[in-house]
Image (cartoon, grey):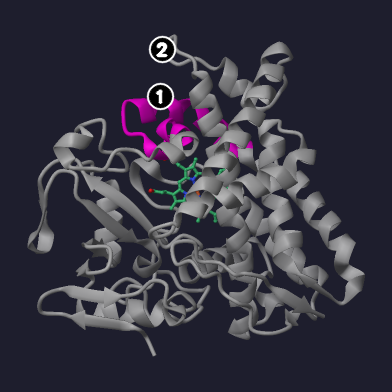
Amino acid sequence: MTPISINGAARRVRLDVRDPDFYRNPLPAYAALHAECPAFFWEEPRQWYFAGYDQVNALLRDRRFGRQILHVATREELGLAEPKPHLKDFDALEAHSLLELEPPAHTRLRTLVNRAFVSRQIEQLRPEIEALSHAVIDTFEKDGGVELLKTYAETIPVTIIARMLGIPIEAAPCLLDWSHRMVKMYVFNPSVETELDANRASAEFAEYLKGIIAGKRAEPADDLLTHMITSEKDGERLSEAELVSTTVLLLNAGHEATVHQIGNAVRTILKSGLSATELFANEETTQRTVEECLRLAAPLHIFQRYALCDVEIEDGVALKKGDRIGLMLGAANVDPRKFSAPDTFKPDRDEGANVSFGAGLHFCIGAPLARLELNIALPILFRRLPGMRLKDEPPVKDSFHFHGLERLDLVW
Ligand code: HEM
């Protein structure tokens, strides 16, 4: 039973994101929202949310909205609570993060980082990702079964992003631990324990990176971190705080979502009953398969924006400066006005792009890297283990914003 109650006429919705029936499979709730009111006031978080493809796509690009608000208003003006002292180290990382900035600070930082992430640069990683995928499969191929997330899905993205940045790969277990503790913050109402732990992880992570940055300053190398240290734009370099924040963001964003997308994709493909040989027959079919998995089983389902001024958007939704809105990427991807039979896995559909990587100013800088990793790691896995199947129904993580699996046990 989908635990949703919709008052279509008033555009009001009640839905508990912690209800397992919802987060395990949000598609029935999304279908109900599309049928009755794709723009709605969600009672629990008390703000407006948007589920329609066109509206989400347009709002992501709408410059009247931003990820940040404190560059145009004070906390006092907006009645926002003061920052929590026990989140000092966590907040310090967010304050200089690309993802939390708006122009002009965002433009400057993004330009400095972007060069490393354009498709031409990223394509050069192909042989390394292929070799790594094979090497990881070699470690478990003879076992007849594996838990895929902790082995394959986690190893590839963290290794590649650490190598790109020039962080020693021996640090991978620490990087994963810090990152897991920090992303626990991105749920509705994290507990004080979660906050304290995320703050400790932020402090340890920043301390570690300051040491690495000092090393690179003394001995520059051919890697992204050295490039960020030495790059200038309009005579300005990145400050130490910006370097640390950006590196944390790249390391965290660089694997958290991709890990879950590998898991979600493997599960989707195995459950579809379609032939993996045909799905991965060539580069074009592989690309279509990867994009259809990103559409139907995206790892990130919601992002927030602040109204930067008083705004009235279509349908008469009136927002005040500082109001937050939620953009439901996962729901936009299954909008029946955009995609036919949206809950069906159909890699040969030709109905336009998914919004899993966002759109506009904050469009995922790592999309070419994530796509390359998925386009390499998935076909290699299915080719090497042709008899692969689900051992049991994989448990879904108890978080809705990050839609992923707890574990993924496979046998062959
Ligand atoms: C399947 C994997 C991934 C998905 C689905 C994904 C999704 C997203 C989305 C939706 C956003 C936009 C958020 C917003 O508009 O508020 C974003 C931003 C971002 N992503 Fe990704 N991402 C993935 C992988 C990566 C990777 C591999 C990296 C880095 C190596 C990365 C780095 C970033 C960064 C730095 C931003 C912030 C960009 C900005 O604010 O200008 N992501 N990602």
Identify the mark at residue 108; answer none if there is no mark: 1
> Is residue 106 magenta-colored?
yes
Q: Secondary structure at mark 1?
A: helix
Residue denoted by label 2: 234
* Residue 229 makes an appearance in the image: yes
Q: Nearer the viewer, residue 368 or 42?
A: 42
Residue lying at the far bottom of the rendered structure: 1
Task: Decide: is 327 above or below 366.
Answer: below
Residue 307 placement (x, y as % from top left): 20, 46
**Tag 2 and tag 1, C-beta contact below 8 Å:** yes
Precedes in sequence: disc 2 or disc 1 = 1
**Label 2: how many residues lie within 10 Å, few (<14), some (14-19) or many (20+)?**
few
Question: What residue is drawn where x is 71% and y is 33%?
Answer: 167
Identify the mark at residue 235; answer none if there is no mark: none
Residue lying at the far top of the rendered structure: 235
Residue lying at the far right of the rendered structure: 142
Residue 348 falls left or right of residue 273 = left
Residue 300 falls left or right of residue 133 = left
Question: What residue is drawn where x is 87% and y is 77%?
Answer: 144
Residue 127 placement (x, y as % from top left): 77, 46
Q: Is the CB of the residue bearing disc 2 within 8 angstroms of ligand 1?
A: no
Question: What residue is drawn where x is 14% and y is 36%?
Answer: 77
Task: Decide: is 288 above or below 180.
Answer: below
Q: What residue range appears in magenta? A: 92-121
